[in-house]
Amino acid sequence: MAEDKQNHRTFFGQSMQYDIALLFPVLFLVGVGIVMVYSASSALALKKFGTSYYFLKKQSIFALLGIIVLVVSCHIPYRAYRSLAYPLLFLAIMFLTVILISGFGYSAGGAKRWFRFDDFTFQPSEFARFALVIYLAYSMNRKMDRIKAFSVGFLPHVLVLCLFAILIMLQPDFGSVVIFGAITWIMLFVGGVRITFLLGSMVAVIPAAYYMMAGADYRIHRIMSFMNPWQYSGDKGYQVVHSLLAFGTGGIWGAGIGKGYQKLFYLPEPHTDFIFSVIGEELGLIGVLVILGLYTLILWRGISIARNSPDAFGSFVAVGLTTAMGLQICINMGVALGLLPTKGLTLPFLSYGGTSLLMNMASIGVLMNISGVKKMVKAGR
């Protein structure tokens, strides 16, 4: 009882301390994102909507809402998510199911991944990723004394992952399934699940992954264009080729903001999936290195928060959220640089997209709450 009262005072009786080392790079990237979204999308918006400010206005609104979400989530005690683990999990499953079986789902590019409300869209898989992290952290924290048992520490978590994987594959979205699997694998590894179970799961999933890859012609074409994009420059390799041309044109110092060429109806989705290419062309190697440095600082702080969390639940949450952001960053940049097969995935804090920005800002808020509680514990508050 005394401990509960102390926790109550810690959470609500004191103002949270903002982690400046985490907050600064996030806000800087959001600001850069607004500028680069406008630069990358102005020509497209003018042609499609009659005004070059269309995506700029929406991204500015998303950024403002994202800051509000960050502040609110920063002041929500991270331990409160323990009681929300199953409600969030149920809500995520419900969203992913409804989008498939109802008329509310919005399709684009052959995939049904969004709810659409007038001009705004919501992508349930982004929310589901957050819900999965919270569920895994809560479940592993409860089962710490039996985490090495197959039926306790491994099987239940993999079954939840499989449910998510099935629902997301029906959209279809193979890339998100890979991300969900990687998050689960890393969190279970950190939590102490037997490595034999984890390695065995990797071996077992290879035939299923091969079947899904071979069962869709467009995925095979993506792999072929990835291996030699220049051979398929007029078809499946078109995106990667123009992305590489953008980086090559940028050189060391870049062409200058607004002076990029590949965004002018050559590079598909320049304000979302390939905004990193526009940054490479307009800000050059120097701009790319600055962006990489800011991302490195965010991920380093996330890992540091996980290592120094006041409890295991906070550590698991920090590991999961940091892993999710790190995978998203690496995959988007890898695709833009031709190091990975093409996958429609936004770049955190920079790409145009409301759901991704809001969920990533919420994740930063949760990380800052974990960090702030640790600082107050050290200060004896």
Image (tube, rainbow, N blue to C red):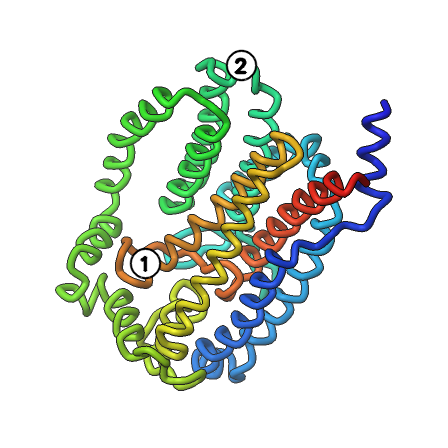
Residue at the location (71% across, 44% down)? 375
Q: Secondary structure at mark 1?
A: helix
Query: Would residue 94 be visible to someone looking at this image?
Result: no
Foreground residue among 118 and 332 = 332
Image position of 344 with respect to 146: above or below: below
Q: Give the quadrant of the C terminus.
A: top right
Image position of 255 with respect to 165: above or below: below
Outermost residue to the front: 379
Amino acid at the residue labelled 1:
Val
* C-alpha gap between disc 2 and disc 1: 40 Å
Q: Position of residue 355 (x, y in %)?
A: 56, 56
Foreground residue among 53 and 69 = 69
Residue 335 is marked as: 1
Query: Would residue 38 be visible to someone looking at this image?
Result: yes
Specify whether 246 is left or right of 327: left
Specify whether 186 is left or right of 136: left
Amino acid at the residue labelled 2:
Arg
Q: Nearer the viewer, mark 2 or mark 1?
A: 2
Specify whether 173 is left or right of 116: left
Residue at the location (62% across, 65% down)? 62
Q: Give the quadrant of the N terminus.
A: top right
Residue 146 is marked as: 2
Disc 2 packing (10 Å; few <14; some 14–19; many ≥20): some
Q: Position of residue 91 (x, y in %)?
A: 62, 38
Disc 1 packing (10 Å; few <14; some 14–19; many ≥20): many
Residue 283 is marked as: none
